[in-house]
Image: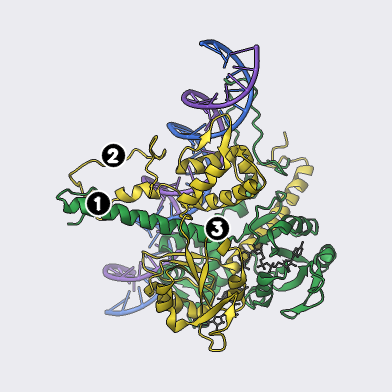
Chain colours: A green, B yellow, C purple, D blue
Amino acid sequence: MAAQRGQRNGVGVTPPAPTAAEITTPIPRVTEVPAARERARAIPEAAVARLAVYLRVLSGMQEHGAGTVSSEELAAAAGVNSAKLRKDLSYIGSYGTRGVGYEVTVLIEEIERILGLTRKHSVAVVGIGNLGHALANYGGFPGRGFPVTALFDVDPDLVGVPVGGLPVEHIDDITRVCSEREVSIGVIATPPPAAQSVCDRLVSAGVQCILNFAPVVLQVPDHVEVRKVDLAVELQVLSFHVARRADNAAVLAEASARSANGRAVDGLVVS
Amino acid sequence: MAAQRGQRNGVGVTPPAPTAAEITTPIPRVTEVPAARERARAIPEAAVARLAVYLRVLSGMQEHGAGTVSSEELAAAAGVNSAKLRKDLSYIGSYGTRGVGYEVTVLIEEIERILGLTRKHSVAVVGIGNLGHALANYGGFPGRGFPVTALFDVDPDLVGVPVGGLPVEHIDDITRVCSEREVSIGVIATPPPAAQSVCDRLVSAGVQCILNFAPVVLQVPDHVEVRKVDLAVELQVLSFHVARRADNAAVLAEASARSANGRAVDGLVVS
DNA sequence: CTGACTTTGTGCACACGTTCACAAGCGGTA
DNA sequence: TACCGCTTGTGAACGTGTGCACAAAGTCAG
Ligand SMILES: NC(=O)c1ccc[n+]([C@@H]2O[C@H](COP(=O)([O-])OP(=O)(O)OC[C@H]3O[C@@H](n4cnc5c(N)ncnc54)[C@H](O)[C@@H]3O)[C@@H](O)[C@H]2O)c1
Ligand SMILES: NC(=O)c1ccc[n+]([C@@H]2O[C@H](COP(=O)([O-])OP(=O)(O)OC[C@H]3O[C@@H](n4cnc5c(N)ncnc54)[C@H](O)[C@@H]3O)[C@@H](O)[C@H]2O)c1
């Protein structure tokens, strides 16, 4: 069981190709068999994220007293295609009744089971500045099975101060505290320059899942899962769409001008 | 202007699209033919998000005095495969020099052009609570071409109070203010129940891009672009990975136990 | 029990995104 | 000039995700 494609600081796949330009590769396509992995990895990443959304929608429906939902209803509420929803649900099993729909409580249970929400996941927030305060004060996490059990910062003025009812610890105690409180998810809300070092400390403290708010590409060992929330990227993607829209508008305007000139525009069927 | 009509060659991709120089419209389908749109939409959404990351990495390199970068270096710094990086860059044109690499300043300019960052995008934040305060106080947006020009809330105690140097407006003034200040991106940081209504108001105020922090699936017209940041989903995806890891560990342990028993495990080739 | 009706679960085709591998192109060197 | 090593740009293979369409499987009325 060799650690595959290790990438510590240098990413890249070291091209094993010799210096020769022409190399015949008689290699009959390496087909690694992901047998053991098969079972759990059968669920596409994109589907997992959607399952979390379905779960929230279902919870809302349950509080509203709904007993069953059809894929159509649930899909509409979750903002997806109903076929996609059914396929997503099929990844976790067959819990629907044909002709009727899905029982809300059953679906909630099963999704929670798959997402590992039957167990609580202790969360630590590092960097109690603007964002860290907001996160620490946010009630939505504990309510969803993610209790915030530790806060860290370097600022001596902050250490010891309670934020959201929990006193801030010093970053140097991170290993001890994370281990004591069995932290399984670390949230990084420090300035960018500190993020990698904080990440390293979290990893060496045994934290295997990290949610990163700092606009930095974190380097982590293979066994650590990182998700990033990058607001600048989000805004820039939106900006791209604005620009695209403007371009399109320009093109369309030009097109319709030409069209008005007596020339048909390809693609734009006015009928 | 300078839209990216590939002046040297096509954009590069250009699938075997039939020559759109056809005058007669064959009317292949009721839906609009994406001919005019084709040009600008050639960049995959996923690539756009990565371009934003490359841009940030490049800016860092520029400040560090770097003149050129190879795709390998840039890819490593951005945490992606170098082939993917080159393909992403190829969507925006051919700005590299073979045998040398890319000129940092050129690349920055071109990415900014594609992302529409040559123009400033005015941002409005709605819901000045925990999160809204953090966003309003954050200096990273204005510095990146996204000036926050309006803050809104319903709380009368908040209206008029300056946050991050900008006074909070009442939500009822949203149409007027957004139009006056030419807001192009709306950020929703209200409690979930208010999100849809706020969204509707933003849309009717002419805002076409929305970044939503409320855990709610927003319903919007087709012409409005929504991106959501859902921390609960992020945490739940991480939770899923924790669970999967645990499952895999269990399976592997069992497997190696069986293997030690003298039986080869399918898929786990030790070679 | 039968038949009409509803909704699930999934095979299949297609679109999208990723990765490989290499010819083309460039700068430096003899 | 001719060569050589390096890096880009990209065709093509591959894998993943999406959406359609429909048989299978259930409910319910009579
Ligand atoms: N505030 C926002 O709305 C916002 C938006 C997008 C991204 N971000 C990103 O989130 C991060 C935090 O933003 P912020 O506005 O809260 O910044 P901030 O400056 O208000 O807070 C940062 C906190 O981290 C602490 N810190 C610094 N170095 C540390 C270390 N080594 N270990 C532990 N703590 C350390 C500081 O003492 C400070 O309390 C930044 O990377 C920022 O780019 C913030
Ligand atoms: N705080 C966090 O860290 C965090 C994390 C994840 C998600 N969220 C989500 O972000 C949103 C905001 O969170 P928060 O912690 O800042 O909440 P908050 O309660 O602190 O702030 C909400 C603000 O919105 C204002 N508001 C309410 N209705 C409004 C309306 N109709 N129009 C305009 N303003 C209105 C309120 O007056 C309040 O100031 C919530 O949907 C929450 O679920 C927050």
Q: Are marks 2 and 3 in contact (CB under 8 Å)?
A: no
Give whichever of B178, D25 is nearer the camera: B178
Please, which residue is most extreme toward the left here? A262
**According to the image, label 2 marks what residue?**
B18
The lab-note entry on whether marks 2 and 1 share a chain reads no
Give whichever of B205, B265 is nearer the camera: B205
Give whichever of A75, B195 is nearer the camera: B195
Callout 2: residue from which chain? B
Q: Quadrant of the C terminus of chain A?
A: bottom left
As drawn, the label of residue A255 is 1
Give whichever of A117, A67 is nearer the camera: A117
Asked which secondary structure carries label 3, the reply is helix
Task: Estimate how packed mark 2 is, as few (under 14), some (14 to 19) or many (20 or more) residues with alpha carbons within 10 Å.
Answer: few
Callout 1: residue from which chain? A
**Is label 3 within 8 A of ligand 1 (CB to nearest ligand atom)?**
no
As drawn, the label of residue A93 is none
Precedes in sequence: disc 3 or disc 1? 3
Q: Quadrant of ligand 1?
A: bottom right
Q: Quadrant of the N terminus of chain A?
A: top right
Question: How far is mark 3 from mark 1, CA to CA?
Answer: 32 Å
Q: Amino acid at mark 2?
A: Pro
- Percent from the top left, x then y, of residue B91? 46, 43
Asked which secondary structure carries label 1, the reply is helix
The lab-note entry on whether marks 3 and 1 share a chain reads yes
The lab-note entry on whether marks 2 and 3 share a chain reads no
Question: How far is mark 2 from mark 3, CA to CA?
Answer: 35 Å
- Percent from the top left, x then y, of residue B268? 69, 41
Task: Estimate how packed mark 3 is, as few (under 14), some (14 to 19) or many (20 or more) residues with alpha carbons within 10 Å.
Answer: some
